Image (cartoon, grey):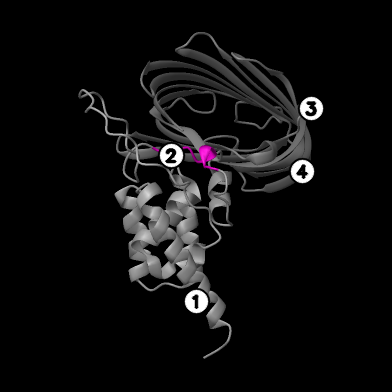
Amino acid sequence: MSSRFFPHCTRAVLAALTGLALAPAALAELPQSYLALLEEADTRHISDELFLETADMVSVLVDGGRADVHAAILAHVPGRAGLVADWPLPEAQSEPAPEAEPEPGPQPEHRDLGEAPVDLAEAPAGSGGWLAAPIRMLQDDTWAGQIRAGIQLERGNSELTDLTFALELDRELEDGWRIDSQFEYFIAEHDGTTTRDNWLAELRVERELDSGAGYYAGGSYDRDEVGLYAQSAFLTAGGIWHVLERERMDWKLRAGAGQRFREAAATGETTTDWVAEAGSSFSYELSETSRFASETTAYAGGGSRIDQRFTLTNRLFGDWAVQTGLRIEHEFEDRPGFEPTDVRLDISLLYAFD
């Protein structure tokens, strides 16, 4: 037998004996779901490393931290006691004097895996570990967004009434990083024939520094079967400046450079040009239930263009709202047979989530 086994064995025995001596006086039972998780990890004969990771994760989720998990392992999974021998144990407490039974009243909430979410930021000290630490790091990274569905009236190169569907996803990351994305789909039929089957995809990644300045990179792709260009795409990068950030008002500017790709609807000819971009994002809460927002993007260079979007969102109840939007697109490059300006008015039912 290897000599390395004896220190480990001795350590486990001493930890177990210590736990048996302290457990009756200080053991705080874990919620049954967490205890079952530890017992299942033991009965499956997983490696010591994986068992220790499981125990460390449970210590993040319980009020007593590593001390309570250590005591539970000593009482219910003594064969693994040596793995947590250097973890703290609950302090010994004297037996409380008998008291009269209290009058029935509301019971404190018992949190376990199937009930209220646990705030990982409140994990007790000493509940670290390489598995538990990333759990706490991720607790601030949340997705938010909205889903919209409605109708859209178009004027300009077409006079159509479309059904629309849109999905927006945003995510706040650490160190000022943010992801904004949007996907829109338009479809229309007339006399059994599909007259519109278009979609738009946009993505922008940005990082804002403490000074309010920052930088971004983004792009978009637009397929339009009845517009001046059958398809167009932008890819740009540059800097941002957070002009205003108040409780009810937010305003952000951006400027950069990139490339624009276009495919002419009439000829199929493709063109790629360098462009300069300037943009503005503004929002204002008119009341507790109403919010106005505008998004302006202008490109100067080959195929100059300006795109303006205005929205008014009125909350109905809960996470449901009605949104009215106006979008104006103007191409500065004239083409025979095509209107330079397209105007779209849409009314949608919106569901927001975070």
In contact (CB < 8 Å): disc 3 and disc 4: no
Label 3 or label 4, whichever lies nearer to me, is: 3
Q: Residue at x 46, y 71 (%)?
A: 13
Which amino acid type is marked by label 1? Cys
From this view, report whether residue 67 is shown above or below residue 275: below
Picture coordinates of residue 306 (x, y %)?
68, 26
Q: CA distance from mark 1 to mark 4?
A: 72 Å
Q: Which residue is mark 2?
A: 118
Task: Give the main secondary structure, helix, strand or loop, of the magenta stretch.
Answer: loop
Residue 211 numbered mark, or none? 3
Q: Residue at x 76, y 43 (%)?
A: 273
Q: Which residue is mark 4?
A: 273
Image position of 53 (left or right of 34): right
Which amino acid type is marked by label 2? Val
Report the residue that reaches farthest toward the top: 287
Q: CA distance from mark 3 to mark 4?
A: 33 Å
Q: CA distance from mark 1 to mark 3?
A: 57 Å
Q: Secondary structure at mark 4?
A: strand
Q: Secondary structure at mark 2?
A: loop
Local crowd size for mark 3, using a 10 Å CA cut-off: few (<14), some (14–19), many (≥20): few
Q: Which residue is mark 1?
A: 9
Is tag 2's residue or tag 4's residue first in the polypeptide sequence? Answer: 2
Image position of 180 (left or right of 287): right
Which amino acid type is marked by label 3? Ser
Q: Residue at x 69, y 39 (%)?
A: 175
The span picked out in magenta is 117-124
Q: CA distance from mark 2 to mark 3?
A: 33 Å
Label 1 or label 3, whichever lies nearer to me, is: 1
Residue 118, magenta (yes or no): yes
